[in-house]
Amino acid sequence: MDIQTSKEAKATVVTLSGRMDAVTAPEFETAIKQLIEDGNIVFVVDFAGLDYISSAGLRSLLATAKLLKAKNGQIHFANIVGTVKEVFDISGFGSIFQIHESVATALAQIA
Amino acid sequence: MIKVEHLSKKFGDVTVLNDISTTISKGEVISIIGPSGTGKSTFLRCLNLLEHPSSGSIIIDGVDLLDRRTNVPKIRQKMNMVFQSFNLFAHLTALDNLTLGQIRLLGMGKDEAARKSLDLLRLVGLAEKADAFPDELSGGQKQRVAIARCLAMEPEIILFDEPTSALDPTMVSEVLAVIRRLAKDGMTMLIVTHEMDFARDVSSRVFFMEEGGIYEEGTPQQIFEQPMREKTRAFINRVRSFHCSISSPDYDLYAMNAEIEIFCERQILPKRIGQKLLLLVEELLHLHQPLLSTETVEFKISHSEKHGTLEIVAESSGDEYNPISLTNTPDELGLNIITAMTETINYQRFEGKNRVLLVLGEK
Ligand SMILES: Nc1ncnc2c1ncn2[C@@H]1O[C@H](COP(=O)(O)OP(=O)(O)O)[C@@H](O)[C@H]1O
């Protein structure tokens, strides 16, 4: 899995590509933890390039959200499609997380 | 014991079996595999005279089957057959299905027949169902009764015609276990089957049928690992299942994924199905994680073109442990994914192992 980050005015955009599985999910958690330590607490995660997610990935997303909640932070997801969307739907993640069509719409909604 | 020479069978103008010659010795277990429509069933049915060969000869222990003076019922008792569709008598209990032939054909007394039949039902694990009628039994149980009924005729040879093809995938293993046991006891058997792993580990010899004949034969090792002829190779490549055994919590997920991808390519499965397979295997591995530091988990993936399904079996050694029980999983995420993506998910404690079976449709 490849993780790219870029700073926008109101949030840090994290762009994922490849596979988020038992091997790579911990890499995601570590990366976000580092960003939080550096003072970032509002995130938009772009899933457009991600073509696989397993429950290990879902657990990392939940852990990250929990971490951010404790810091009064926010996490938004964008571009959930294909098999990733299928897994999100099965797991009811659509109702737990704030999901947006694109990174732009996500950014527009962040106050 | 069985000597077949130049056996041919035509239906009208269509030649289904073309000049088959082979010899089968006592105690051999022969699996007959091959694509549909290549005459596997017809071959068995000819041996049992359910079909009359067009030419050639079949000699059983020196008796020529095609000699008009041969006692056909006697031959069928000595070389009994188990069918795909069980063929039990619906109006008789399991026990009476067995005793009927013993009394009528073997001339046994009622009490003796009942005693022997009950022993045979016990052998196939169904003594408690002696008084049940066929429609009160599951498919797997019906087939086990049918095997017991076959044994009740004290046969020296058993012919199995796709004994598990009509069964729900969850019931296949109980029937195969009974046949394995007969093999261990030295019964001579010919088995037409689509269960390749079973054929591989139960047989002494494998016949690959194609073009109306025994196109290639050999030990399971020869046929499944080093098939010599082109059509055998093509067939084996298509049906070969994926096996892998994991015995450390630090397993190499990507090495396993790569092998599964090769398997999917060989099976010509759509990419989407391949993705699902990878996901299901990863989730299954996760559910088995607590076992991996002490036990070995065997994974097997097989593709049934016939049923349009993929089967994933994870079998673990050690004490009874149900990896798909909610009490053993920290959260429901993995289990939810598996349940949503499969047609069947079940756990069985079977022959001292924990066995999780998933069945995935190809659509
Ligand atoms: N009673 C029959 N009349 C006409 N054709 C038959 C009959 N039984 C089988 N066949 C034909 O013989 C061929 C071989 O059938 P079968 O022995 O059932 O093949 P397999 O068991 O390898 O699938 C098939 O083409 C089938 O249609």
Image (spheres, rainbow, N blue to C red):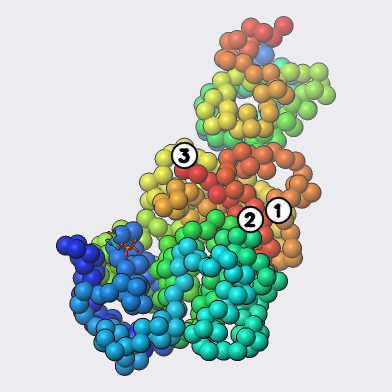
Residue placed most toward the observer, B138 or A5: B138
Identified by mark 1, the residue type is Pro
Circles 2 and 3 on the same chain: yes
Tag 3's secondary structure? loop
Residue B142 x %, y %: 57, 65
Q: Which residue is mark 1?
A: B323
Residue B363: assigned label: 3
Tell me how far mark 1 sits from mark 3, CA to CA.
27 Å
Tell me how far mark 2 sits from mark 3, CA to CA.
22 Å
- Residue placed at 58% from the left, 15% from the top? A101
Q: Is residue B127 above or below residue A47?
A: below
Tell me how far mark 2 sits from mark 1, CA to CA.
8 Å
- Residue placed at 35% from the left, 67% from the top? B41
Mark 1 or mark 3: name the one nearer the start of the chain: 1
Identified by mark 3, the residue type is Lys
- The N terminus of chain B is located in which quarter? bottom left
